[in-house]
Image (cartoon, helix red, strand yellow):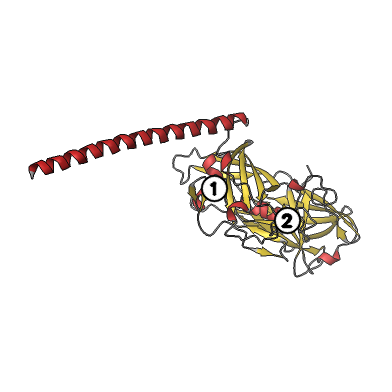
Amino acid sequence: MKKNVLLLGLVLFSFGTTNAQLLNKLKKAKDQTSQASEVVEKVSETTKGGKKKKAGGFPTGLKLDWTMFKQTPAVTFNSLLYGTGSSPGLINSYTATFIPNKTVDGKTVHHFENQSEYLRIKVFKDNQYMNYFEYSGDQVFDDGKKTKFNEPDSRYQRDGEWVGHSESFITQWGPGNYRLDFYAGDKMFYSFDFELVKLTNTDPYAAMNEMYVVRGPWNNFAYLNHADTGNLLFGFYMTHEEFMPNPSNSRKTTKSVKWSANMYKDNKLFAQHYGSGPNSAQVEQAEWNEVQCAFKLVNKTSEFKYADLTDGAYKVELTIEGESKPRIYNFIVKDKKIVQIPEQDRTKNTDPTRLIEGWNDYFWLKLEK
């Protein structure tokens, strides 16, 4: 009996030793293969020029039927300014126009099943590709001509790693000049540039030592919009970059800013912002706020309607507390219609990836320098 046990033990020992040696060989071969693969990837990145970060992780993309709409796709300018500026560092919630929802073979795109290849944004920092984000295309409106770039409801895998809300911030890559390239399927159709800045507080007693802010076209553009009520609305953007705007209360980060807007027609005062005296806006720290107002005709109390516009040369003079000079925005009305700036006019814009998209109800005004 003892001999049988001993023999069985020797057999098991021999079997275990052989298996261990085999496993070691397999592991070694796997490690060598992995190392070789990494070398190939690094060589491939080098030959493509520059340092790439996870460039190979971007899926090819669906082949979409781009004949669905006659117009070229774009991203509405107000959603660009809101989606990029309302929460510094978060790249989310944009409205794209004229994105097809069918593939070249006639299949309807499914927002969940095709999410990894449908709506995405590539992020570049200082002209170096960083990574990409996926978006859900479940929200479509205006006869299918508008599609929202919304953050997915659930996490998804990117380059083999799970991605959620916390990974949707570009602050992970630090300050710099950023470019967002918008993709639908395999086509890049729009680009947007801005700067991410990191501010540092030197006050050792401060409640907050650093914050991120975005800078870009927010100051350089305003808009006119005809509301459902028929009113002519004027809109612009404000933010502040102060760590402690209220010295008596370090926790209160909003700042009250006075402003006023006057409209001139053919160099004569024509209308003023609705209200008596300067208006006041509650401006949030490091977040771009959209401010709107209606107009009233000079010496009258009635609101100025969009239909009241007559042909002529107009100017909006916007005065903001703390700014050394007024912001000036000129526009022309011809045949009772606001003449679009060349960057917004689809018949004059030469680069569809930089179109100032206002749909048919936002007329963008460019700051006079």
Q: Which residue is mark 1?
A: 169
Up the image or down, 306 lies above or below 35; here it is below
Name the residue at 82% across, 52% down: 346
Front-lying residue, 128 or 79: 128
- C-alpha span from label 1 to label 2: 31 Å
Q: Earlier in the sequence, mark 1 or mark 2?
A: 2
Disc sitting over residue 53 in the figure: none
Residue 274 position in % (x across, y down) = 74, 63
Which type of secondary structure does the marked residue at label 2 adopt? loop
Q: Quadrant of residue 293?
A: bottom right
Residue 243 position in % (x across, y down) = 53, 45
Front-lying residue, 20 or 5: 5
Q: Which residue is mark 2?
A: 65
Up the image or down, 70 lies above or below 51; here it is below
Characterize the local packing of mark 1: few (<14), some (14-19) or many (20 or more) Cα atoms within 10 angstroms.
some
Residue 56 position in % (x across, y down) = 57, 40
Please state which amino acid type lies under the numbered disc 1. Phe
Horizontal side of residue 107 vs 198, given as left or right: right
Quarter occupied by the N terminus: top left
Name the residue at 88% across, 52% down: 267
